[in-house]
């Protein structure tokens, strides 16, 4: 994700939600974020909230591979101060 394109992010969230290889908790977090974006909440704020929700799992290397890739993308997109989300 080179920039925060709302449609692209919604598509990625939708595809992850439908993926049968992610955990229920991850799916719930992604679904909440998708619903917030569709309801008109800010993409940056919603992704920041999602990143914060997934961070404890990411720090323990306890995310499924596809969610890990998505987490790394949102953590690298310049949403946060330097150093935050750069651990993985």
Image (tube, rainbow, N blue to C red):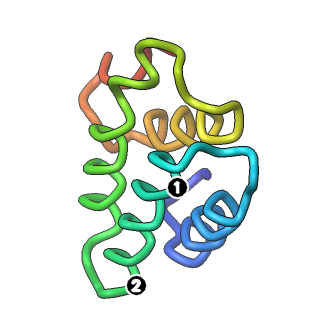
Question: Residue 32: x and y, percent?
Answer: 36, 66
The circle drawn on residue 69 is none
- Against 25, is 80 above or below? above
- In this view, the residue in front, 70 or 31, is 31
Tag 2's secondary structure? helix
Q: Residue at x 65, y 62 (%)?
A: 12
Q: Is residue 76 left or right of residue 1?
A: left
Question: Residue 44: x and y, percent?
Answer: 31, 59
Residue labelled with disc 2? 38
Neighbour class for label 1 at 10 Å: few (<14), some, many (≥20)?
Answer: many
- Against 33, is 85 above or below? above
Q: Nearer the viewer, mark 1 or mark 2?
A: 1
Residue labelled with disc 1? 27
Question: Residue 72: x and y, percent?
Answer: 54, 32
Q: Residue at x 58, y 78 (%)?
A: 7
Neighbour class for label 2 at 10 Å: few (<14), some, many (≥20)?
Answer: some
Tag 1's secondary structure? helix
Q: Residue at x 56, y 40 (%)?
A: 73
First in sequence: mark 1 or mark 2? 1
């Amino acid at each position: 994700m080179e920039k925060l394109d709302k449609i692209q992010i919604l598509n990625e969230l939708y595809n992850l939600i439908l993926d049968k290889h992610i955990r229920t908790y991850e799916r719930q977090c992604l679904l909440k974020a998708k619903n917030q974006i569709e309801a008109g909440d800010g993409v940056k704020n919603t992704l920041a909230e999602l990143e914060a929700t997934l961070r404890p799992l990411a720090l323990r290397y306890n995310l499924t591979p596809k969610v890990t890739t998505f987490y790394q993308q949102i953590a690298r997109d310049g949403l946060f101060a330097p150093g935050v989300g750069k651990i993985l």
